[in-house]
Structure formats: structure tokens, C-alpha cells
Image (cartoon, grey):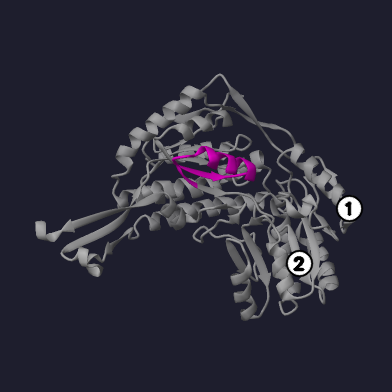
Amino acid sequence: MNPKPFLLDGRPVTTSETAEVRNPYNGELVAHVCVAGEKDVSRALDVAEKTFAETRHMPLIERSRLLRKIADAIGRRGDEFVELLVAEAGKPVSLAKIEVQRAQSTFELAAASALEPNGHPIEMEATPAGVGHVGVARRVPLGVILGITPFNFPLNLVAHKVAPCLATGNTMILKPAMKTPLCALLLGEVLAECGAPAGQVTFLPFGHQHVGALLRDPRVKMLSFTGGVDVGWKLKGEAIKQKVTLELGGNAACVVEPDADWKRHAAKMAVGAFAYAGQSCISVQRIFAQESIYAEFKDVFLAAVREKAPAGDPREAKTLVGPMITKAALDNVVKWVKEAEAAGAKLLTPLKVDGQVLHPVVLENVPRNAAISCEEAFAPVVVLESYKSYAEGLAAVNDSKFGLQAGVFTSDLTKAYQAYDALDVGGVLINQVPTFRTENMPYGGVKDSGFGREGVRYAMEDMTEIKSLVINERGL
């Protein structure tokens, strides 16, 4: 198997250092990938800086046309992306198809957003000193952006960095997760085929040891990071002069009120908890049901889990729960489950493991300070708990160091607004699971879940800065 090269300045590059990409379901070797070294990373930065002189002046209509071409190309090559998502990430094929569709939408939205107004007049005469002047403020690109993406959405989370970068005229070095670099490398081929400037986005597999050097280089103007909590905050500390956005972890919760149509929504919560083995930072990990319905809700939810969350081979259309990305991740969450049991928690489902597939796990009576409740499990595990009053249920959601998204199930609009006001999260979803996300909504968290927002238009704002022009008309 010949090593997969990466594209640098429009040319394929092979290196002596390679990394294996293995299928997490069966352990099969998917590919060897060439790993960039220090000289490659340095050259990529040189190329990105040089290319920015071109891309910053690219007309908006050209940016939009390029983005539409990329969206169309993703659609044409969708089967290739689906195959890679299943092979390198162990993503169930039904979910892989959805990810490809979402990535296509991400580029389509960026194509439209590239043409939207990006400036506004300044009312100079609002102050005495401004009389006789006119002003305008526009958003301009920052320059070179370092993008770092995780393993779990190796196409669409990459798209959420690349598409806004292209739409704003920036350049980017994109470091994909070393466990799942193949979709990013294929996307790099798509950009080249569609006519993107060769150095505008360089998809570069490289070790974490090179990230520090990039962050110390003043030519890198922004860090856009999606990944683990500890790594993200550490990199923020190193990015002294860069603008930083962090999309980090969570332990998303749902609150279920008696007035909701909760029997119908239980299946939605089961899918939101266990799809892709819970390996999403907004996967449902905690469910709080009001005590008057708790016992019945538990039965209905467990029935929905049995029906809606089959585990097994990700290549099978019926599979919702595929493998954990590594055995180490699997072993860690199993340890957490057993620790919770030892502390008094009750398992409501069998603790069943097949290879790297952990079948859905549901627990109750879990202490709030147990790791499986208060940390990010990133696994097919849900903790059930009852509450007395609605205020108590909302407080239980906030009893977390994370704050990404939360779901609240109620038919009472007053309660919906109460949740919106009270919950300390980046997004409140009413009668929807926190796992829900569209490409055009602002997405991000508070507390340890990070800061800044993705979602195409919102990422474009983060990737630009305001530049003002003031003209003294009396001096003309």
C-alpha cells in the first residue's frame, strides 16, 4: 500500500514518516498517510502567507463561485467520502451519508454568505467632532489561520473551518486528526480540482509538536480549534497574539416536563444519545425527567433504545452505534461505568462489549460527582435522574463545568423562555435534543465548553476584523 501524499502548494508531497489509519471496527489497515515534518509545516506557512496577498483581494463573486463548485464536487464524490467516513472513523453508513450532505450544505451556505453585505456606514455626525466627516466600517480578512479538527466529524467539522475561510479571503493550514485524516486529504483534492488557489488551504497531517511553533509565529493570525478540553485551553495559553476560538467538550443534558409529548420524543432522545456511539460533544449524556413521570419515562426510553439504537457493523444500514474510536477510549468509559456502579449507580442495560463496540448503556442513581456524569463520556452512555420542580431540573443542567447545548421538552412557552434565560449554555433547544445542529445556526459553548461561535456566518465574523474608513469632507 503506497503512502497517501498530501498537497502542498499544489503538488503532492511524500515523506519518509508515515502514519497508519485503521478501521476502528475491525482493525483493518485503511491507509498509510504521509506525515509532514518541520520543514513541510514551515513551507506551508510561507505559502499561506504568500497566497493571502492574492486571496484577500479575490472578488466576492469569485469566492462564491468557487464555494459552489466545491459543494457540487462534494455531491458528485459523495460515495467516496461516505466510504472513507465508514472506514477511518467507524461512522455508521447512514450517518456518514448525512455528514456528506451537511458538508455540501456548509459550502453552499458559505457561497451565499460570501455575497452578503460585510460593512456598514458610521454615523459620524452623531458627535460634534464628527460633523463634516463620513465613515464606513467593513470586515476584512485576518490572514493565515491555523485550523485544528477532531476525529469524530472528519469531513463536516473540517468544512466548517474551510468554507468560512474561503468565503472571507483568508488562508489556512488545516491540521486534521491523525486518526481520521483521509476525508480532509480528499477534500484538499476537491479544492484543487475546483480551482482554489494552491496555497489557500493546506491540509497537512502533522504531529502536535509542531503546533507551538506555528502559534509563536506572528504570521499566524488566528487559531480555530475543535477538540479536547485540556488541549484546547493549553493551546489558548500558547496563542498569545492570535485570535482564538475554541469548540470543546460537553456533557449535554435534557429536561423532560410532564406537559411535553415526551412519549413521542423519547425515541429522539435515544438517537441523540447513542448515534455514532455518542462520540459527539453535544451527544445526550444526562436526562432529567420530572418525578411524576420518571418511572414511565424510563420504561418508554429503554424501549426506544432497544428499537432505535442497534449496535454493530457500521457498514450495515440498520446500525446506529458503531465502534469507539480506540480501545483506550472504550476501556476508559467502561471503567467509569464500573466506578459509578461501585458508588451506588444502577445499570438499566447490560454492559455489553463486542470488539470496540460498546452497546448502549443507561444508568440511574448515579452520584453527580461520578465521572460518567460530570465529565464528558464521549461514548454511548446516558445517565437518568428525576427532579421535583422545573427550577430544580434547570439547576441540574447547570450543575456542570460544561455549557454547550441543552434540550428542554415542554409544551409551555413560558417554560421555554424560562429555560432560555436560566440555562448557562451556548444553545437552548426546545422539544429537540441538544445533538441537533444546522450549518447556519450559531454553535458554541460557555464555561469549559469554549468560546467563539461556528456556523458559517458566525465563523466568518470570527475570521475577520473591523476596519474603518473616515473621510474629512472639508479637506477634499
| Image quadrant containing the C terminus | bottom left
Is 4 left, or right, of 381 in this rendering?
left
| Image quadrant containing the N terminus | top right
Q: Based on the displayed image, in which of its 4 quarters is residue 48 positioned?
A: top left
Residue visible at 61% across and 80% down in the picture: 413
Residue visible at 48% across and 54% down in the picture: 106
Of the residues tagged 2 and 1, which is closer to the observer? 1
Residue 136 in percent (x, y) is at 25, 59
Q: What crowding class fits label 1: few (fewer than 14 Cα within 10 Å), some (14-19), or many (20 or more)? A: few
Disc 2 and disc 1: Cα gap in Å?
Answer: 20 Å
Residue 393 in percent (x, y) is at 73, 70
Q: Dot 2 lies on which element?
A: strand
Q: Which residue is mark 2?
A: 288
Q: Dot 1 lies on which element?
A: loop
Image: 152 above or below 119: above
Residue 225 in percent (x, y) is at 54, 44
Instruction: Indicate the amino acid at tag 1.
Output: Ala
Residue visible at 34% across and 38% down in the picture: 52
Q: Which residue is mark 1?
A: 343
Residue visible at 58% across and 32% down in the picture: 208
Q: What crowding class fits label 2: few (fewer than 14 Cα within 10 Å), some (14-19), or many (20 or more)? A: many
